[in-house]
Amino acid sequence: MPPADSSSTSVPAWASPAIAPFARGRLRRLMPGLSFVLAWIILALGWEIGAATEVLNPRILPPPSVVIPYILQGPGAAGIGPQQVTYGEAIVKTLARVLIGLILGLIAAIPLGTVLAVVNPVRQLILPMIQTIAPIAPVAWVPVAIALLGIGDQSAIFVVFMGVFAVMTLATAAAIENVPQELIKTARSLGARGHQLWLWVVLPATAPSLLTIVRVNFFAAWMAVLAGEMAGINSGLGALIILGQQQFNMRLVMTGIITIGVLGFAIDRLILLIQRRLLWWEARSKGRTNG
């Protein structure tokens, strides 16, 4: 019998060698999301089993089967009279305070950090003060904020600002100082001067570290405003959790905690996406390296 003609045998599309790299790449892109979902499923199952077996006290730590329906139906308000805090209002207030405080902190810190890196007399005068402020925990500013600005949005924004400003100033100065001198010398030899040097050399060299620090400072701002809301600024998600605890409404407490985690994670992913879009040259260089 003559040998079968291999050219007449049809090869399934999925078996094509060109498909394998595509499938591996798609799986690699999906893995972080799948891992995230799997981790939370495992945690929820453990939490549910712990509550069912009373290893975890379900009155103090209500399980997901109780908390999730409570979130979906719309959590009620906590507090009485002028101290009453609603769930939707708490989310809006906390997000607005973090956003405004973070933006104001960056607007003040980046120019000052640039001046500290470039102008030595200013550095000698201002840097010790910034280094003294940086280690102070944001929650320590809450009494000062309330005494100066009263209870309200201004105090929360001030706490966020102080939690971001000093650290971001030091990070900006360090990032500019760490720009390789070889890059600057090369750019100057090619004719770059003044704003061209800053735009085409310093900014691209410092942008990756600065945007990473912005992500870190977001978490600092997020924790600062929540600490402030819990410590005396009687509104927002932090205040909602404290009021829920005082009323022993643990479903509301867990709702606040879960909301804080989900919102923080979502905003961090958004900042990371913006970072990847802005730093397109980094993504390309990593693609070449991985290739």
Image: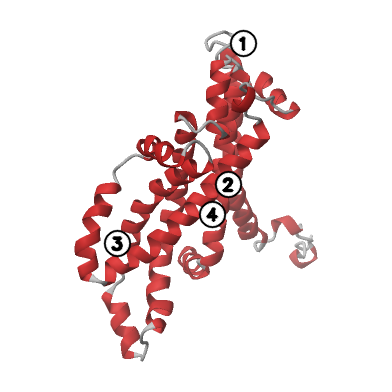
Image x and y of residue 1, in percent = 79, 60
Q: Which residue is disc 2 drawn over?
A: 96
Q: Nearer the viewer, mark 1 or mark 2?
A: 2
First in sequence: mark 1 vs mark 4:
1
The CA span between labels 4 and 2 is: 16 Å
The label number, if any, that marks residue 271 in the structure image:
4
Q: Nearer the viewer, mark 3 or mark 2?
A: 2
Image x and y of residue 256, in percent = 58, 29
Is 12 situated left or right of 44 in this image?
right
User: Which amino acid type corresponds to the residue marked 3 in the rendered image?
Assistant: Ala
First in sequence: mark 3 vs mark 1:
1
Is label 3 in contact with label 2 (beta carbons under 8 Å)?
no
Image x and y of residue 124, in percent = 19, 63
Which residue is rendered at x = 47% and y = 69% of the image?
A: 285
The label number, if any, that marks residue 52 in the structure image:
1
User: Which amino acid type corresponds to the residue marked 1 in the rendered image?
Assistant: Ala
The label number, if any, that marks residue 174 in the structure image:
3
Disc 3: CA contacts within 10 A as few (<14), some (14-19) or many (>=20): some
Q: Nearer the viewer, mark 3 or mark 1?
A: 3
The answer to whether residue 101 is visible is yes
User: Which amino acid type corresponds to the residue marked 4 in the rendered image?
Assistant: Ile
Q: Which residue sits furthest top?
A: 54
The CA span between labels 1 and 4 is: 38 Å
